[in-house]
Image: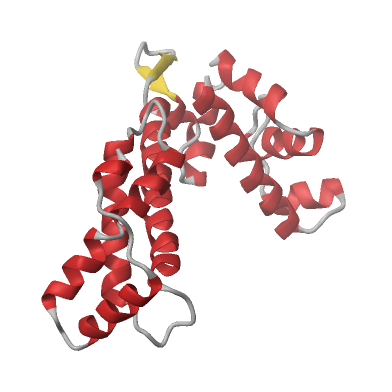
Amino acid sequence: MSSSFPNPLTEKEEQYYVKLLEENDPDARLVLIERNLRLVAHIAKKYAGPMTTQDDLISIGTIGLIKAVNTYTSKKSTRLATYAAKCIENEILMSIRASKRIKQEVSLSLPIGTDKDGNEISFNDILGTDTDEIVDSINLKIQVGKLHQAVNSALTPREKTVIISRYGLDGAEPMPQREIAERLGISRSYVSRIEKRALEKLKDYLGEK
């Protein structure tokens, strides 16, 4: 793939075209982009996989290259190629993270069972981003066995205690963070951090199933 791209610029050639670019020469901009496409292909190859082909990543990485050329100046302490490599990699990584996030959101929206009225429910229904919404609905959805499995498998004993108490997973009334903090002898802000970390663990665990 990379062999089909033109050879990269030498340092002297790069300096020449960067100078022309700063003089608003449109042809210089095209040269700087085209002669760095091999760099895009090289970086894209490192991140290619079953879900993201090298061709797709080259297209994404080229956007990062264009951004690099548009923002680079000769005043920078590094060569354009070095600066562009970072921009290309950042663009590719942002795209991969976005794809993973979308995949997780889709998997969390898949139905996993029904409530007592026969309505389909998903993991998103159980682990909604709105904490008050979770508290309001958790007693209804507690029958979903996979949630129990996630709590028992993914959480530390302290995280499990906080989540069970916070959302009433033991059948009791959900407890506010302040009361949980008093029971455990820790600060309310620490309880909040434990709760947030535990919910993220549950989402990750359930998203992998």
Q: Quadrant of the N terminus?
A: top left
Residue 152 to residue 195: above or below: above
Residue occupying the point 67% across, 53% down: 192
Q: Is residue 10 left or right of residue 175?
A: left
Q: Is residue 146 left or right of residue 52?
A: right
Residue occupying the point 58% across, 14% down: 145
Q: Position of residue 205 (x, y in %)?
A: 58, 28
Total tally of numbered discs in the picture: 0
Residue 20 to residue 94: above or below: below
Closer-to-camera residue (11/48): 11
Q: Position of residue 95 (x, y in %)?
A: 36, 47
- How was this image coloured? secondary structure
Task: Residue 205: tell me if it is visible.
Answer: yes
Closer-to-camera residue (55/158): 55
Looking at the image, the residue that sits furthest to the left is 26
Residue occupying the point 18% across, 74% down: 28
Residue 55 to residue 60: above or below: above
Closer-to-camera residue (134/21): 21
Q: Position of residue 22 (x, y in %)?
A: 24, 86
Q: Quadrant of residue 172?
A: top right
